[in-house]
Image (tube, rainbow, N blue to C red):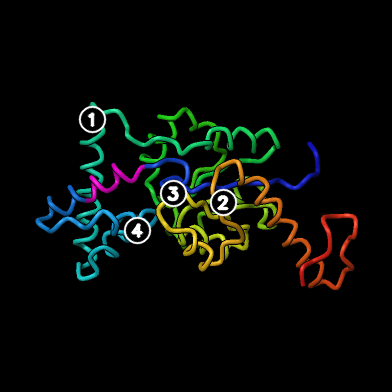
Amino acid sequence: MSDAPIRLAVFDCDGTLVDSQHSIIACMEAAFVAAGLEAPAAEAVRRVVGLPLAASVARLSPQLAAAECARIAELYKQAFTDMRRGNPIDEPLFPGVRELLAALESEGVVLGVATGKGRRGLRITLEHHGLLDRFVTLQTADDAPGKPHPEMLRRAMAETGADPATTAMVGDTTYDILMALSARTAAIGVAWGYHPPHELRAAGAHAVVDAAHEVPPAWLRVAKAAAAEAARARGTPWDAGSSGSPSA
Ligand SMILES: [Mg+2]
């Protein structure tokens, strides 16, 4: 075994690995209608993808009591099960994702997932794409507080032996960015998901990428900037042999 620090890339699922908005919107509509309520607008549902289910319902209908939110969350799960019965899963991988995972693995990066999805749903999605065994650690809202709480990311690091300085969270929403900042990892936003890039930047993303193949170089830039910042904080002279002088 080498002594090199473990590098860990933790991915969000919905809106980052897979484009699952159509099934999520359809199930949320079905759940609200089954509860005798008006279905929320598709755009409103896209905004809450990534939060734990009951929290998404509460965000969509703030006037609902907690018990009603929990009931609608159960109706959502039922709708999901019904929809999947006999139907192919309509959750394509985003372009370049499979190649990105392979590229990271070939560099020795350990892969993980942290998602607001339940464990069962996550496993079905990853299995469908033949990706389940690629991820060393799977963190779901079944086992820890949901995003933006940092616990899922902390657990991913603890399970793999990684630390924040060599860990990146990659996600499409401000919930992912805020979780990463709380856990003090690199926060890399992706522009192809459900929150717009300017919101990811405003939330504090260290980088926002437009395409999957841009993740590794963006992570390298973020890590170098963080190392330079840490060196400055320690008062250590910047190593002129690396990528140049610090910017300020
Ligand atoms: Mg997401």
The quarter holding residue 121 reads top left
- Mark positioned earlier in the residue sequence (4 or 2): 4
Q: Position of residue 62 (x, y in %)?
A: 24, 69
Residue located beneath label 3 in the image:
140
Tell me, for residue 209, which label it has, or none.
Answer: 2
- Mark positioned earlier in the residue sequence (3 or 2): 3
Residue located beneath label 1 in the image:
85
Residue type at mark 2?
Answer: Val
Q: Quadrant location of the N terminus?
A: top right
Residue located beneath label 4 in the image:
48
Q: Are marks 1 and 4 in contact (CB under 8 Å)?
A: no
- Mark positioned earlier in the residue sequence (1 or 4): 4
SS at mark 1 in the image: loop
Q: Position of residue 139 (x, y in %)?
A: 48, 48
Mark 2 or 1: in front is 2
Q: Are marks 2 and 1 in contact (CB under 8 Å)?
A: no
Distance in Å between CA atoms under marks 3 and 4: 16 Å
SS at mark 3 in the image: strand
- Mark positioned earlier in the residue sequence (2 or 1): 1
Q: Position of residue 31 (x, y in %)?
A: 18, 50
Number of numbered discs overlaid on the protein picture: 4
Residue type at mark 4?
Answer: Val
Tell me, for residue 30, which label it has, or none.
Answer: none
